[in-house]
Image (tube, helix red, strand yellow):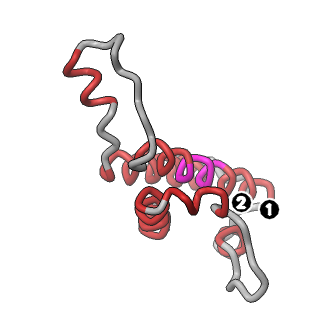
Amino acid sequence: MEVNFVEYRRVLAAHPNLMPLAGRRVEGDPDSGLVFLVQQGFSEDDAVELWQSVMAFVVGFSMFSSLNAETDTSDLPRDLGARLADWRDDTCTRTLRVILRGYDAARTK
């Protein structure tokens, strides 16, 4: 599942003008990820919370990693500022795994 979100993040970061459309559904869309989560055994409450959390993370990460984002690091040591401005795909993937595993481990049955 994280692969889908990583690709979504990549597309949003590459095309920041799509940000206002992120998360919108249109008629004819296949079942959403939210429905998929319920089908995977998450309660409706857990599925909604997980979906909202992952979407907020992915859209936010995409926004900050896009070419349009500016990170003011002038008050930081140079090396730390350079690292802060480097939004890595590996960081996104690892954090998504943590979020997904955390929700999976804490499912309310």
Classify residue 56 as left or right of residue 85.
Answer: right
Classify residue 82 as left or right of residue 18.
Answer: left
Q: In the picture shown, does residue 84 fall above or below 42?
A: above
* Residue 70, horizontal then vertical, whole percent: 42, 34
Q: Which mark is residue 47?
A: 2
As drawn, the residue found furthest toward the left would be 79
Question: Which residue is pictured at 44% across the width and 53% down the height?
Answer: 97
Q: In the picture shown, does residue 9 fall above or below 32?
A: above
Write the start and end of the magenta stretch as one range.
Answer: 53-59
Question: Which residue is pictured at 29% across the width and 38% down the height?
Answer: 86
* Residue 75, horizontal then vertical, whole percent: 35, 11
Q: Which residue is mark 1?
A: 44
Q: Residues within 10 Å of mark 2 (few under 14, many from 20)?
A: many
As drawn, the residue found furthest toward the bottom would be 28
Question: Which residue is pictured at 68% across the width and 85% down the height?
Answer: 30
* Residue 96, horizontal then vertical, whole percent: 47, 52
- Viewer-proximal residue, 64 or 4? 64
Name the amino acid type tagged 1.
Answer: Glu
- Is the C-beta separation of discs 2 and 1 under 8 Å? yes
Q: Place residue 74 in its image quadrant.
A: top left
Q: Residues within 10 Å of mark 1 (few under 14, many from 20)?
A: some
- Viewer-proximal residue, 5 or 86? 86
Q: Which mark is residue 64?
A: none
